[in-house]
Structures are given as structure tokens and as C-alpha cells.
Image (cartoon, grey):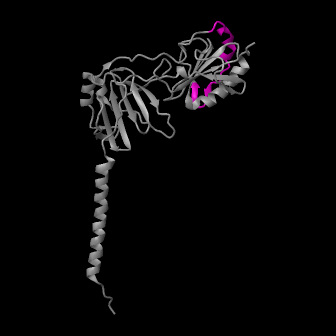
Amino acid sequence: MTPHFNRTAIFISLTLSIVMVLGVIFGAKYFYETYAKEPVAMSPVDSPLADSPECAQLIASLPSRFMGHPRAEVAEPAPPGAAAWATDSTQAVTLRCGVDMPFQYTNYAQPTDIDGTSWLQVRDMTPQSTLTTWYTTDRAPAVAVTTFDDQRPTGLEALSELAQQDQPRHPAPLSQLKAATNASECSALDGALPRSLGDYQQDASISPVTEHTTVWTAPGREAIVLRCGVASPPGYAAGKQLQQVNDIPWFEDTTLARGTTASTWFALGRSTDIALSVPQDTAAEALVELGRAIAAHTPADA
């Protein structure tokens, strides 16, 4: 017996299936074009030269694609001297022209050459963040490129139109502290400090700008700096809160932390005061490791 098929029902089912597939396709396309590719929001930052003719010329000459992403619209109110590229709203690369150099750009910063331009890498230290901002250190006006995945800003040929000019550096951490009269007692500590602190390493190519100073660096991070033989902390007074870490009482002077991601700590109770500038997310480990060396190689205050 030959089975009987209801062709009308089959045709209706096929038609409904095709309509549903097309609906999904067009719905996804509509979502992508309407929401996923929304204009890129860019908050205002200190960019004193963003309105300069040089920045206007740079923005006009930027490529339609950069780092694998198409040029995107910047959400209103769009800051001057700004541009963006994005595959979708969660994968945006932004550029700002005429920015101030970050406080991380000191004598201890180590720029990287990319396509003939010198860049300073500054990572966002927010937990789970992969944002990195790169600052040109040899162009005027200065340019900042922020990537969402730590990539290097390669292929930005338009930068060749800017003047080659080294950007001024900010004072090195702890360099503006007054020296103590008994700094000579630091000699034993100078050679006893650890070569590494977590991801940080001492770099022999860095020449500290002050005596009895040791510098540890890590890619994209603000340096850790220890300086032995400094005058009493300017913000310290009797009754101020101290943090005891093993044998060393530490005082955090928050008045010295403006414009930087680092805290300034002072090891007290020794024959001479010792200052430490360290990024906040690394401070706990650094206070322990360096405290051991300080306790072992500097005499206690009589």
C-alpha cells in the first residue's frame, strides 16, 4: 500500500521553516547594525591641544581601517581630536590627539619603538581589564591609542605627519623628597635588595636620579621605586595611622599620590627613613619582601 502524503502540509511546513530562518538572519543583521555597531562613546580627558591644526589634520588623514577594525562614528558629544574604529561596540580602538602625557612617563619609563614611533604602554590595572593605552613620546602633539585587547598600535602611518619632538617627562618617583643627613647608612641595603618583585625586575639600563635608589620595572606598569635615606615623611605626625608588616611599621602618605596609580610608603623605626613608591595592587607583596631586606640590613632607630 502506497503511503499518502499531505503535500499541502509539507509545503506549508517548508515555507514556515524558510520564513523563520530568514527572520533569524534579518533579525541578527538588524541587531548588529542597530545595537552592536552603535557609535563609540568617548569620555572627555585632558587634551589641551586637541583643537590644534595639527590634530585636525591628523584626524582627517586617519585610515578607514586600523588594527583590523573599520572606522566608527564617535558618539555625541564627540570630543575634539578623537577617532574610533570598531567591529562592534565591545571591540573598539580609540585615538585621541593633543593629550597630556601620563604621570607614568618619568625618567624610569621605558618606551617601545613601533613602526618608527616611540610609544609608552600604560595598562589599565582594573581587575580583569585588557585595556591598554599607548602614548607617543616623540610626536607633537602627543597621541594616545587605547586598545581593548592589549594589542600594539601598528600601521598608523598618519603619525608621520606630526612633528618629531620628545615629550617632557614628569619627575621620577621620590626624586623630590629631601635627603636625610644620615643617608650613608643605606649602603648595606643598596646591595641586598631582591632582583625581582613578582613580575617586576631590576633593570641595569636605568640610572636612578637620586642616590640610594633602586628601580624595578614591568611592561606597561608603573615602576616600583625604593629610596633609602630620605627626610621624615612630610605628611607624618604623631598619632597618624601606621601599618605594621612583620618588623617594619609603614606610613602611607596619601598626599604624595596625586596623578599616579602608586602609593608612597615610608618605612619608619630605622636609623634613617626609607621611601617606597609602588602601584597599589602590588603594595602588599612589596611591603613584605622589601621589609625583610630593610629589617636585615638597616639598623633600628636607637
The quarter of the image holding the N terminus is bottom left
Quarter in which the C terminus is drawn: top right
Q: Nearer the viewer, residue 68 or 252?
A: 252
Q: Which residues are magenta?
A: 180-201
Above or below, comparing residue 33 to residue 207 in the picture: below
- Vertical side of 173 occupied by 21: above or below: below
Q: Position of residue 19 (x, y in %)?
A: 27, 67
- The residue lying furthest to the bottom in this view is 1
Please tell me which residue lies in front, 246 or 296.
246
Residue 26 lies, in percent from the top left, at 28, 58
Quarter assignment of residue 200: top right
Residue 142 position by quadrant: top left
* x, y percent for residue 182: 66, 8
Residue 39, placed above or below residue 7 = above
Residue 205 in magenta stretch: no
Q: State the residue at coordinates (63%, 9%).
A: 180
Residue in the foreground of this view, choosing between 241 and 301 = 241
Is 183 magenta? The answer is: yes
> In the orientation shown, which residue stands out farthest toward the top?
181
Residue 247 placement (x, y as % from top left): 72, 24
Residue that appears at 37% across and 28% down: 45
Judge from the rendering whether residue 280 lies leftward or rightward of residue 25; answer left or right: right
Q: Residue furthest right?
A: 302
